[in-house]
Image: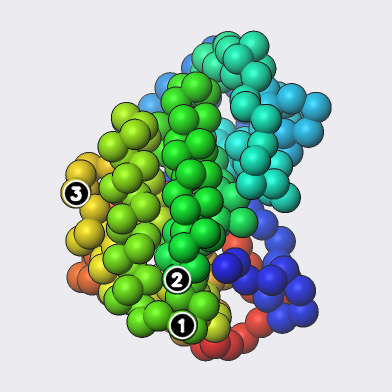
Amino acid sequence: MGPKKTGATKRRRKESLKGEQEEEGERKVDHRAGGMRKKRGNNKYIGAHMSIQGGIWKAVESCIEMGGKSFALFLGSQRSWNRPPLDQSAAAKFQEQLSLQGFDPAHVLPHGSYLMNCGSPKKDVFEKSQALLIDELSRCNLLGLNLYNFHPGSSLGSITTEQCLENIGRAINHAHRQIPTVITVLENMCGQGSTVGGKFSELKGIIDKVRDQTRVGVCLDTCHAFAAGYDLAADGGVKSMLDEFDQEVGLHYLKAIHLNDSKGAARKN
Ligand SMILES: [Zn+2]
């Protein structure tokens, strides 16, 4: 599903929400509630993927220590399909920390489980993925979060891309019906193997299948885009990628950016 973080695709992870660059001077974090986030003229929210080890609320604390203004996190173990439910008191503590530190929930972007493949041609995997998606969205609700980012899926080479996109759309619609509010944010992929989402047209293909399009968005991963063929290192590379994204998908769907560098060359896949 995801790119293996080995060899050429190994990279440092830096995840940010709607913000590409930040000037040095703006990095200082104001620990007063809402201080930094209310700063006029500063609408860039930069952070990283934070660990939830020791308790999910620890992610908020670690982000503050790091000087971040937004963060990503996993919502449970990445190794298990059947995780124990999210502890209510831990979720309450997370929300308390979030509000104490002045975070807008819209600047927190949970990352989906790598086990999930909502595009899977295998019935059992599809059903387990659909159930996991519902579980993840319900965790977002419990944490007071309204965005959820995940890797769209893979055809495993045994169904067409279109059929894979249909499965993903079906899983999203099903999850939306079960769980209110949360926006499902599709991540662009590097186009490796039979993974879908490397082409913006594939992301649009999924969005077109979602009934409530106010509840779908995109997170652009720069490392994935680079590997998929967008030469972001070239002059005008970022602009041309964003222009193409706007044309094929629509910039209003862009909810976040995973700002990663890459050890591999452009168009690796
Ligand atoms: Zn990802």
Q: Which residue is mark 3?
A: 211
Q: Are marks 1 and 2 in contact (CB under 8 Å)?
A: yes
| Amino acid carrying mark 3 in the image | Arg
Q: Position of residue 152 (x, y in %)?
A: 44, 62
Give the quadrant of the C terminus: bottom right
Q: Give whichever of 65, 41 is nearer the camera.
A: 65
- Left or right of 96 on screen, residue 130: left
Q: Which residue is mark 2?
A: 121
| Amino acid carrying mark 2 in the image | Pro
- Distance CA(mark 2)–CA(mark 3): 22 Å
Residue 42's label in the rendered image is none
Front tag of 3 and 1: 1
Which residue reaches farthest right?
54
One can see residue 86 in this view: yes
- First reached walking from the N terminus: tag 2 or tag 3: 2
Q: Residues within 10 Å of mark 2 (few under 14, many from 20)?
A: some
Q: Are marks 2 and 3 in contact (CB under 8 Å)?
A: no
Q: Residue at x 36, y 78 (%)?
A: 161
Which residue reaches farthest front?
124
- Distance CA(mark 3)–CA(mark 1): 26 Å
Give the quadrant of the N terminus: bottom right
Q: Which residue is mark 1?
A: 158
- Left or right of 121 on screen, residue 206: left
Which quadrant of the figure has residue 119? bottom left
**Residue 217 versus residue 105 in the image, above or below:** below
